[in-house]
Image (cartoon, rainbow, N blue to C red):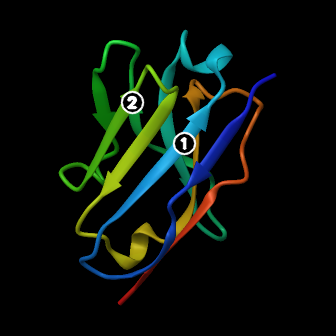
């Protein structure tokens, strides 16, 4: 059974930081590149950060230099450190494999106030 559980979101002022966590079931974590996606109201879900099984990372231009994705293979965890947050980062954030599977968690809301 695939499980993805995101946490760590909240309300933060512009310029602040948050660290998101994702607990993934081993079945999806071990064999996959993992990513963080986000969806703002009225927008499509977008991929913002990817990390391969080997630790290689890639970022959307909009978050490059501000966000850092990491993974803990021993704990099947994926993290997203978000610094210098902007109001346009406001969205529900999800983790999933890359390319995404049909199994989505509940997401975690990030709200950045100006």
* Left or right: 74 in relation to 38: left
Q: Which of the numbered marks, if any, corresponds to residue 22?
A: 1
Looking at the image, which residue sits at the far left? 65
Q: Earlier in the sequence, mark 2 or mark 1?
A: 1
Task: Residue at 32% x, 52% y: name it.
Answer: 81
Looking at the image, which residue sits at the far right? 1
Q: Which residue is mark 2?
A: 71
Quarter of the picture containing the C terminus is bottom left
Q: Could you tell me which secondary element the residue under label 2 belongs to?
A: strand
Q: Which of the numbered marks, if any, corresponds to residue 41?
A: none
Give x and y (percent) for residue 33: 47, 20
Give x and y (percent) for residue 22: 54, 42
Q: Could you tell me which secondary element the residue under label 1 belongs to?
A: strand
The answer to whether the residues at label 2 and label 1 have Cβ atoms under 8 Å apart is no
For label 1, the crowd category at 10 Å Cα-Cα, with few meaning under 14, some 14 to 19 and many 20 or more, is many
As drawn, 21 above or below 83 = above
Task: Residue at 58% x, 24% y: name it.
Answer: 99
As drawn, 71 above or below 47 = above
Task: Residue at 32% x, 74% y: name it.
Answer: 86
* Left or right: 27 in relation to 90: right
Looking at the image, which residue sits at the far front? 74
* Left or right: 3 in relation to 61: right
Q: Quadrant of residue 42?
A: bottom right
Looking at the image, which residue sits at the far bottom? 114
Give x and y (percent) for residue 17: 30, 68
Q: Quadrant of residue 105?
A: top right
* Left or right: 106 in relation to 110: right
As drawn, 29 above or below 90 = above
- Seen from the viewer's position, the closer of residues 69 and 63 is 69
In space, the residues marked 2 and 1 are separated at their CA atoms by 9 Å
As drawn, 48 above or below 19 = above
Q: Quadrant of residue 62?
A: bottom left
């Amino acid at each position: 059974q695939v499980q993805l559980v995101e946490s760590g979101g909240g309300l933060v002022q512009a310029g602040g930081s948050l660290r998101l966590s994702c607990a993934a079931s081993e079945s999806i974590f071990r064999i996959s590149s993992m990513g963080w996606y986000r969806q703002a109201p009225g927008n499509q879900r977008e991929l913002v950060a990817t990390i391969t099984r080997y630790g290689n990372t890639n970022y959307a231009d909009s978050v490059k230099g501000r966000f850092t994705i990491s993974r803990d293979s021993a704990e099947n965890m994926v993290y997203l450190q978000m610094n210098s947050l902007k109001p346009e980062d406001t969205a529900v954030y999800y983790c999933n494999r890359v390319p995404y599977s049909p199994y989505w968690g509940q997401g975690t809301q990030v709200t950045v106030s100006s």
